[in-house]
Amino acid sequence: MDLANQIILVTAALITFAIFAGVLSSRIGAPLLLVFLAFGMLAGEDGIGGIKFQDFRVAYLTGSLALAVILFDGGLRTTRDAFSRALTPALILATVGVLITAGVTGVAARYVLDYSWLESFLLGAIVGPTDAAAVFLLLHLRGLRLRPRVGDTLEVESGINDPMSIFMTLALVGLIGTGLPKGANLGEVSLKLALDLALDFGWQMGGGVLFGLAGGQIVLRAINRLKFSAGIYPIFALALALVVFAAAQSVEASGFLAIYLVGTTLGNNPHRATAEISRFSDGLSWLSQIGMFLMMGLLVTPSKLVPILVPALIIAAVLIFVARPIAVMLSIAPLKFKRGEVAFISWVGLRGAVPIFLATIPVLEHIRHAHTIFGVAFIVVLASLIVQGWTISAAARIVDVELPPRPQARARVEIGLPAGIDRTVVAYTVDPMSIIARRRMSRMPLSSSGTEIISVMREGQVRNTTPADGLKAGDVVMLVTNADTLPSLDRLFAARKTRLKAQDVGSIDFTLSADVNAGEVADMYGFLVTPHERDLTLGAVMHARLGRAIAKGARVRAGTVDLVALSTGDDESPKQIGLDLDPPPPQRLTTLLRLRVGEMLRSIRELFLADPGN
């Protein structure tokens, strides 16, 4: 009993102090996962804690469970649009990219460590994959907002590249353990081996997809058809997802890919307990990340890393500066990524707990040099978190893939509804610097379709209708809406700073069809169009103002907003138009005069062309 109490005390204390250390470290910009890993080392055998932990079996079991939970949560937060947009580049990076990275790193390990080719490629396979926990956390924790295709590619890649690395690790461990039969023909053995590996990999990926999609539908239907207390749904959903994970693993398919797809299916379909499952999964994912990195830190003995520090750092440098960039350039070169986007994707090849987790497999199988391989993998992860994790924001700014952060509403209150109702009730306090207050909106915009104002409280008085003079700063607005419209509402009610820099124009607040009525949109968003333009579509307004074929990315100022062509058709007319509600002001007086003169000339032309009968 005393031992059990001590284990609980030590575990809870480690997690608590790790969180406090993470909060303090954020002031100097240190990656949070690096802090958890370092804190585990400090608590370990060579640190001030003196805790001896060398149970690789427990580490493997705990790491598998934690990684499954993290991938499930990552799938929940991957939207269908993001998944479809990034699937092709992410899939190539998760297969061909990992293979190239492992190969180049393995060649470096062969000459740096003087290991056999199989052992060297095993090390390359272990450190080859990016880490879902590191990517999900470091891209979102500091509010970093990237170009959609770039951010989505990195997140989806980290979510689906584990099967390739796990397959290569297990295959190479098997080859090292068994070796070639005596007297066997090398050519025949190689051909048979290649065929067997191809079939195994096909089943790993195909089986993972099959289990993930089928299991996702089973979990979704079970949640929608069975009635529980609201608090049971998150536990039930995660338990079923882990059943799918374990079932896939038991037949040698990829359980990690399967549980990621279960999360994606659940996160992109309506069900009884969207908010409950999301909150529960988010908290459990945090606990899994903290626990996994603390445990990996405890598992290593820093004094044993000193003899291999220099060769490990050389291998880390090859991985970061050579292998990953080559893999990215060869993998996504045909996909029309811009040079800066390729550079950023190359740089954010974040390594985390996955390589350390994979490095426990050779130790469990008693492979020669297994402990050294584990130590090298640990140093590579540390180097990645320090060098890459610490510089993500700066790298995004340098290569121009960072977008202005989305404003977040600080005063949003969600009111829970009974499970099974696919709606949510929220209350906002109107911020003086919000779009709602500055444009005095009285209706919710088109992007928030399905949203209705229930009541408005102003100066202590509750009204069931929106005031005729629109919403003002300090008003408390209660709305009923769909869960997927909350980000749009946050952007409307949150405080916004005026953007002054020209490079800040990459922000699109809302996306509309080019066929919507310009006058209706202008009224909703509080900007001006001419009387003639009120009867036109947004696409026609852009044509009238630009007077030429419209290319993707073309912008035109309409009063106090920018209309941006997000996609165009074969006839070079816009199909989707984005609204930038806070465009930076014109940088020069001549530009401002040109815009104002253009608006005056359009008004005069419409006046002379107007039908006299009207």
Image (cartoon, helix red, strand yellow):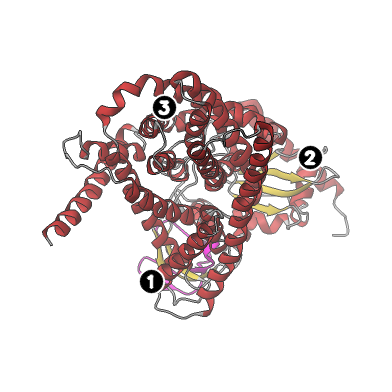
The residue that disc 3 covers is 387
Q: Report if the CB atoms under discs 2 and 1 are less than 8 Å apart.
A: no
Alpha carbon distance from label 2 to label 1? 49 Å
Amino acid type of the residue that numbered disc 3 sits on in the rendered structure: Val
21 or 317: nearer the viewer:
317
Is residue 547 placed above or below 282 in the rendered structure?
A: above
N-terminal-most mark, 2 or 3 = 3
| Label 3: few (<14), some (14–19) or many (≥20) C-alpha neighbours in 10 Å | some
Task: Report the residue that reaches farthest toward the front.
Answer: 183
Could you say which disc has been placed on residue 461 in the image?
Answer: 1
Region in magenta = 456-485
Foreground mark, 2 or 1, reads 2
Please say whether residue 400 is visible from this viewpoint: no
Is 281 displayed left or right of 265 in the figure? left
The residue that disc 2 covers is 550
| Label 2: few (<14), some (14–19) or many (≥20) C-alpha neighbours in 10 Å | many
Amino acid type of the residue that numbered disc 2 sits on in the rendered structure: Ile
Is residue 579 placed above or below 555 in the rendered structure?
A: below
Q: Report if the CB atoms under discs 1 and 3 are less than 8 Å apart.
A: no
566 or 308: nearer the viewer:
308
180 or 68: nearer the viewer:
180
User: For numbered disc 2, what is the local secondary structure?
Assistant: loop
